[in-house]
Image: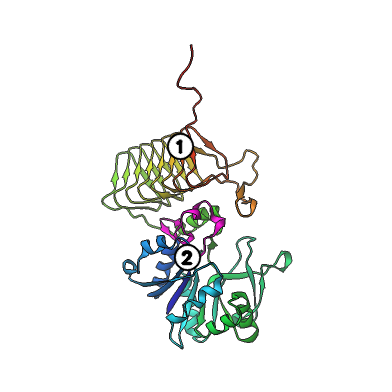
Amino acid sequence: MKALILAAARSEKLTPFTDTLPKSMIPIAGKPILHTVLNQLYEAGVREVWVVVNYLQKAVKDYFHYGKDLDMKIEYLEQKNESGIGNAISLFEIGLAEDENFLLVYGDTLMSGNHFKHLLKKQKRSPNSTLATICHPVSKGNYGNIYLGHDMKISKLLEKPEGTRMSNYIFGGSFIFHKSCFQKIKALNFDIVAYFQFLIREERLDAALWEDNWIDISYPWHILAANKMMMSRWTESVIPSSVVIEANVSISGPVIISENVHISNGTSIKGPCYIGPNVYIGNSALIRKNAAIGINSKIGFGTEIKNAVLFGNSTVGRLSFIGDSVIGKNVKLGSGAITVNYLTSGKSIYFNSQTEGELNTELLKLGAFIGDHSSVGTGHTIAPGTTLNPDTEIVDLITIPSQIKS
């Protein structure tokens, strides 16, 4: 079966990271979101994939090319403007034979296991069915709510209800459609919700229930939650022969370490965690659970990294603490940089969204979100929930000037 992945939208809610990177290319547990989705599709037997792109599409194409390294065939469909899911689906009509089914995949949803296998297994039992993966909601997000009748048939869809109208199920971001969907979607002015309502009312829409963990990556702190979810499934370590491990280094738990990593004397690494290619870790560093350190990064002496994602090509100076934070590409953090990750009041941390204003993250621990190509000088303490936009420059914290009069 062929698959269509929707990966065109910018997603301004994920600022500062989507200012410089497509959402589908945000790294989670050492791989871009889209890479993990493609791996799961491959494991489910899918070999031909079309990816709908628009915003910063060159980053996607330069990374995956046409799928040779994944043993897949990847084609790209450009959605000229962000005109909705129905419009994106309609671009795929030319890729299918007259009687062919296809997988529709939302490119910003991650599952802890392979839900595509689960969905395709159900499709084999009912080859003519239109199917939707459904999940239990994990937050109060704005989701379309699903109600089930007998025999896993979807009986009702309420678009983003509130309060007591909330159901136990929501769409999980993957579907199996038949090519006949294109004509009806066009007739409904490319309104995908109207198409779902048509299926429920006039035809049949069946559900495949996914009961394991999942996450819709909508806000910056969801990057940390997704990273933790994916790492929680790791059971074994991978340490290539090219890795240099000096004396008195302690490694425990599942860790994935890439080629040409250097780990200096006295460092402690506690998995699950990921260390990317060509990373240098200085003496007596502490790398704690759910840390993901991207390619070509340098971690200084005595620095602690905990539950944090570093995209890569970044430097963290000596005696720093980076906790519950997301650090973009090509970021420089000076010696003694501290991301404070809790409030002394014990209250949950708020995040100032550029699109929605002040949001309660409902998290008691949350650090900073630092955009690409930023630099924070020596000695700075960064408040919980802080966002630094790309190319931000904060000079060294100097308390004694260079010239002092006697």
Residue at the (45%, 22%) spot, across then down: 402
Residue 365 visible in the current orientation: yes
Q: Which residues are magenta?
A: 8-32
139 displayed left or right of 116: right
Residue at the (64%, 54%) spot, across then down: 356
Residue furthest out toward the front: 80
Instruction: Name the amino acid, label 2.
Output: Asn
Q: Is residue 150 above or below residue 108?
A: below
Q: Is residue 63 above or below residue 153?
A: above
Q: Is residue 343 above or below residue 117?
A: above
Front position in the image: 155 or 104: 104
Q: Quadrant location of residue 163?
A: bottom right
Residue 195 placed where, x, y %?
Answer: 60, 79
Front position in the image: 254 or 19: 19
Q: Secondary structure at mark 2?
A: loop
Residue furthest out toward the right: 164
First reached walking from the N terminus: tag 1 or tag 2: 2
The colour scheme applied to this rendered structure is rainbow
Residue 30 placed where, x, y %?
Answer: 40, 55
Q: Residues within 10 Å of mark 2 (few under 14, many from 20)?
A: many
Instruction: Name the amino acid, label 1.
Output: Ser
Q: Which residue is mark 1?
A: 320
Front position in the image: 261 or 315: 315
Q: Secondary structure at mark 1?
A: loop
Q: Which residue is mark 2?
A: 54
- In the image, is residue 191 part of the stretch drawn in magenta? no
Quarter of the image with the N terminus in it = bottom left
